[in-house]
Amino acid sequence: MIEVVALVVLLGKIGDMARRRGRSPNLFGLMLVICWCVGEIAGGILGFILGLTLERSMNVNPLVFYTVALLGGALGGWIAFRIAGLIDPVGGVWREPEEFGTRRYRLLGAVVGGVVGVVMGAFIVWMTHGNAHVMAYDRLILLAAGFMGALFGVVSGVQKG
């Protein structure tokens, strides 16, 4: 949950960087999400291995696993901001924030966020149960993930600018 809130905040910041350069905030945001996810997955794998070596058994400490995964995600986000900082503005001209008006499509953001949330929830259910019978509480996971995605989509909206 904490990484979703961090990503929503960072997406706004990297979108502003893109607009000042006359570039697409959606592409910069996509780069941020990809770097964050790759970093978090790599950190999760590293945390799993580290947790196995610290515990000296097959039981992994979830605190170690989650902390290292979050640090990997933060590192991926930092890399995305470093890459964004190296990209020059279009035509060599920097734009001031007042020059570009940003329109947010909240309904479209809710739809996109809801669909992404349900897909992520389905992935979580599939990873935990595989092809086994889906229980009623698994449907609640899908519903909750879709609702959270839609909520974050409404808050952030899909930006056109």
Image (spheres, rainbow, N blue to C red):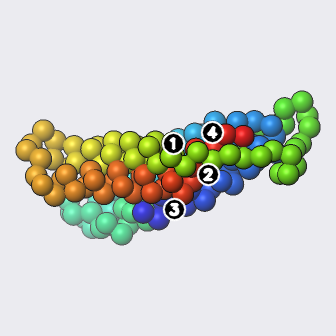
Between disc 3 and disc 1, whose residue precedes?
3
38 or 138, which lies in front? 138
Amino acid at pointer 3: Val
Name the N-terminal-most of marks 1 and 2.
Answer: 2
Residue at image point 51% right, 42% down: 108
What amino acid is found at the position of numbered circle 1 in the picture? Answer: Leu
Task: Give the amino acid type for the residue marked by disc 4 in the picture.
Answer: Asn
- The extreme top residue here reads 91
Mark 1–mark 4 distance (CA, rounded to whole Å): 14 Å
- Of 73 and 33, nearer the camera is 33
User: Which mark sits nearer the N-terminus, 1 or 4?
Assistant: 4
In the foreground, 158 or 15: 158
Residue 158 in view here: yes
At horizontal 45% and vertical 57% (from top left) the residue drawn is: 151
Give the x, y percent position of residue 84: 72, 43
Quadrant into which the C terminus falls: top right
Disc on res. 11:
2
**Element at label 4:** helix
Mark 1 vs mark 4: in front: 1
Separation (CA) of disc 2 from disc 4: 9 Å
Which residue is tagged 1? 108
**Badge 2, how many Cα within 10 Å: few under 14, some, many 20+?**
many
Q: Which residue is mark 4?
A: 26
Q: Position of residue 72 (x, y in %)?
A: 50, 54
14 relative to 58 in the view: left or right: right
Which residue, given by chain and number where applicable, does mark 3 sit on?
5
CA–CA distance in space, label 1 to label 2: 17 Å
Callout 3: SS? helix
